Each structure stands twice: as structure tokens, then as C-alpha cells.
Image: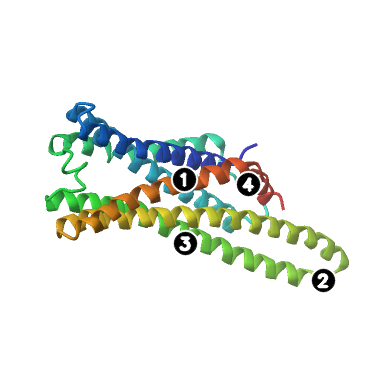
Amino acid sequence: MRTASYFGLVNLGISNIFMAIIYPITSIIIYLAYFALIDVSVGVNVACGFCVPAVVSCVIVANGSLAFIAVERCCMITKSITRSSYISQPKAILTLSAIWVIAILPNWPRAILTIDETSLETWCLLYTNSIATRTSLLTFSSVAIILLLIIVLICHILISKRLKIHQKTIKSWNRISVRAINTNEIRTTSILRIDYSLALLRKVTILQFIFDLLWLLSIYGTVLGHAARFNSNFVGLMYNLQYFAVILAGLQSPIAHFIAIERFRIEFMRCCKF
């Protein structure tokens, strides 16, 4: 049986692949529109009405998937370290589908409502002079990343504390009898396996959020830099940094997951069997 975390990892990989593919397309469309190779209104509608909202949705889904995995692991380990407490496959799929819906709902309606205000000059309202639009864009982007980051950090801290407590308990049991030592050696090995798999997950999570925070900071630099009329080179650098961050965030986890996803799955399956 595949665990809920397995589906979370697959969902993370899918969202990141879409993110890495779709975001570069926006620049291609804008350049084609800029050089009059396609109609400007068509380019703006596709880039700002589909591509950018899709990328933002994928970023939220990726972070939401990491939060889902962290919460699922945290509940399993902290609530019942000695018995199985899987989230069923239907519940996992339903929850991950809900993350997609939650990520999509705030983005496309907003993009469609503001599409008439966008142009090559405003570039999907990143270069807008509207304070309300800037505030809405930056607030939503910040909440979508920072809130999920806090949830993930709390869950990993709780998991680490629970594993340390359980390791201390096993060491104290080892003093009781030889039979207890043999039994607890098996449990200690299982703990180490869990710790190893969670360490892999933490590395992927840290990389994901580093790139996402870099993306968030570059958006702040682009939007606020343009509003404050900073040097155009600085604003351009921040704008290009968005692509760098999103593409790296989109590529690193699918590669890691699809190469080592079986190892992740096996380790997570073992988590509930000691």
C-alpha cells in the first residue's frame, strides 16, 4: 500500500514540473508580442491570464504538498510511534486535490478581472502604479509561502523531538534484559531508518523553500523597486531572478523525487512498522 506521503511527493513533483515548464513560456510570449510576431492582446491574455496564475498556483501546491507530508508524518509519529496510523489513499488524494483547488481559486479570477489593466508595460501588474494591486499581490504571495513554511517547520520540530524521546526510551529499556536489548535493537534500527528518510525529506523541503523565498524576495524587489523608481538595472535583475528561482525550484524536487521516490516510499512504509 502506498502511503499518503508518497502521493504528496508525486503531487510535489507534478506541480514543480508544471512550474518549471510554464514560467519560461511567459517570457517567450512577451518577446513575441513585443516584436509584433503575435497580437499584443493575445500575448497578454495568455501570459497574464494563464501562465503567471498557473505558476503561482503551482508554487502554492508545491508548498502545500510539503506541508501535507510534514503534517501526515508528524501526526503518525507523534500520535502513535508504535502502531500504524496511515491516512487512507482516498483521503490523501482528496486532500491533495483540495490543495489544487485552493491554489487555483484566488489566482485565475483575479487575473481575469485585472486582465484589461495589463499590458506589456505593466507586465501582469508587476509594474503597476496601483497601491491596492501591489498590496494584494505581495500580501497573497507572502502568506502563501510563509504560512506554509511555518507549518512545515513546526511539524519537523515536533517530529525531531518525538524521535529523540523515543530513542531515549529505547536506551532505558535496553537495561532491563537481554531479550529487551534484541527487540529494542530492531526498534532502534527502524528509528534510524525513519530519521534517514526524514533527513532526505528535510533537504528537499529546505531547497524548495529557499528557492520559493528567493522568488518572493525577487517579486518584492521587482514590484517595490519599480514603484520607488529604483535603478532599472536593479529592477531587471530582480525580474530575472524570479525566473532563476522558479526554474530551480521546479527542477530540483522532481529530479530528486523521481530518482529516489521508491526509496522514500519504502522508508515511509517502514516508519509505521516498528
The quarter of the image holding the N terminus is: top right
Is residue 74 visible in the rendered image? The answer is no
Mark carried by residue 264? 4
Q: Give the amino acid type for the residue marked by disc 1 in the picture.
A: Ser
Residue that mark 2 sits on: 176
N-term mark: 3 or 1: 1
In contact (CB < 8 Å): disc 4 and disc 2: no
Q: Name which residue type carries label 4.
A: Phe
Disc 2 marks a residue whose amino acid type is Ile
Q: Are marks 1 and 2 in contact (CB under 8 Å)?
A: no
Badge number at residue 65: 1
Mark 2 Cα shell of 10 Å, populated few (<14), some (14-19), many (≥20)? few
> Between marks 3 and 2, how big is the CA–CA gap?
34 Å
Q: Give percent across and percent down for residue 70.
A: 51, 53
Coordinates of residue 142 in the picture (x, y in percent): 30, 55
Quickly name the residue at label 3.
154
The mark lying in front, picked from 3 and 2, is 3
In screen coordinates, is 169 left or right of 204?
right
Considering depth in this image, is 252 or 264 the residue closer to the camera?
252
Q: Nearer the viewer, mark 3 or mark 4?
A: 4
Identify the mark nearer the N-term, 1 or 4.
1
Q: Residue at x 46, y 56 (%)?
A: 152
